[in-house]
Image (cartoon, rainbow, N blue to C red):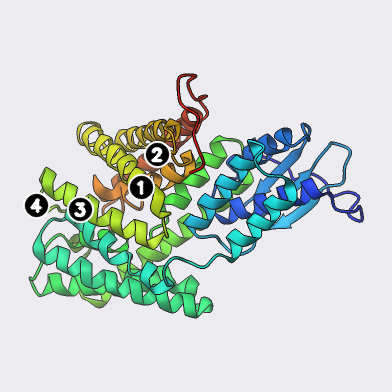
Amino acid sequence: MSRKSPPVRDSAAPPDPLRRLLLDLGEALLGGGLPVHEVEEELRGLGRAMGAPEVRVAALTNGLFVALTADEGTRFQPVGAALRFEQTADVLHLVHRLRAGELDGPRALAELDRIRRAPARWPGWVADLGALPVGVGVCLFLQPVAANVLAAGLGSLIVVGLTVLARRLPSLRPLLPVTAGFLVALLVLSLARASLLDGSLRTIVATLAILLPGGLLVTGLSEIAAGAASAGTARLVSGAVQLALFLAGVAAAATAAGMPAAALANVQVAKPGWWVIGLGLAVAVAGVVVNVHAPPAAIPWIVVVIAVSVTVQVVVGSAHGAAIGGLAGAVSAAVAATLVHWLPGGPLWQVLYLPAFWIVVPGSFGLLNTAQIEVGNGAQSVLAAVSAVFGVSIGTLIGAVVSRIPRPSFAFARPRA
């Protein structure tokens, strides 16, 4: 069901401290990439915990409306700069402390300002270098041949360079998908034309994995299924456009290299053994940890949750296909994240689930089981991609329900993470 934004009334009313807090926290959560329906649920729960049981929240991808009662004027807060993952984790922990009564509003606003101003643990170019182990690790899954892995490493350096350039020159960011698709595909297809490697498509997909908009597509479908049609549709359109730009770049590279469409067939030259899968997973996870600035204290638990979800995804996907494998991987990630959250000192559920989601999601690492992007191979590959996206979307919705299961009474009190 489509959501309508509440009317903005009484815009000249003096700001309420609680409403200001909810607006700032909602903006931060949206800037961290959380689905709009989860942001709304977090803020409603926080409002009830802080004495505003009738709080009304309507979130969009670019901002949110908040009113403390049905009769109160509504305020709008646009989303500012995107937050790093470590900042998003800190904001989620701040919300948890507020709901537990450990902080009051003024202290929370001061803490939120500190989180926004906190410097990154390492420079941006170091985070961008995380694309290198991601590309190599995914290639070990998709095309575990030395020549292909080397090509993925070289192509990943191209991705790193383009990402750094796009950060320094934001006006070039819209060109990143088509440029990356073209340059990476041109490198790989040129090597294939020189008979230095086979199975070009999987090598290209592995190299571009960190840039592909799979997470955007899955989040959009999840939002639509949860009733946030406006936000979900916006994300789907944005993700589809980005995907089309990648495909346009790859198709242009095939033409420039003088390669036929058959050169982009989904061919797996060699199947990876379990030790290769484990090595590829370790390398890729290391890249993700560096790329998203993962909180150091949560890294061991993040690795555990990812290992569980990927194992389930690979085993189930091998037997039943990418769609069922993605669903099983998303649900298992949610279950594992919830169990770890229940442990004494365990990080928050979202902090554990989001990295696993990026690993499982089609378009990023859901491509570990089957290549979802094929140029010139008809509707079958499109159907496979759509079904895989839907599989992870359903698993994500199930996972969100699993995460709300109350902690068992026998669990110990969890100290501050």
Q: As drawn, is 246 to the left or to the right of 134? A: right
Are circles 2 and 1 on residues that touch, CB within 8 Å? yes
Q: Is residue 403 shown to the viewer in this render?
A: yes
Q: As drawn, is 88 to the left or to the right of 313? A: right
Of residues 185 and 97, the one drawn nearer to the viewer in this rendering? 97
Q: CA distance from mark 2 to mark 1?
A: 7 Å
Q: As drawn, is 94 to the left or to the right of 347? A: right
> In the rendered image, which residue does mark 1 sit on?
362
Are circles 2 and 3 on residues that touch, CB within 8 Å? no
Q: CA distance from mark 2 to mark 3?
A: 21 Å
Q: Nearer the viewer, mark 4 or mark 3?
A: 3
> In the rendered image, which residue does mark 2 sit on?
392
Of the image marks 1 and 3, the number of the one nearer the N terminus: 3
Are circles 1 and 4 on residues that touch, CB within 8 Å? no
What amino acid type is highlighted by mark number 2?
Val
Label 1 crowd (10 A; few <14 / some 14-19 / many >=20): many
Of the image marks 1 and 4, the number of the one nearer the N terminus: 4
Label for residue 280? 3
Vertical relation: 384 (above or below) 129: above
Q: CA distance from mark 4 to mark 2?
A: 26 Å
- The structure residue drawn at horizontal position 56% and vertical position 40%, both measured from the top left corner, is 224
Of residues 44 and 391, the one drawn nearer to the viewer in this rendering? 44
Question: Residue 356 location in percent, x, y?
Answer: 37, 45
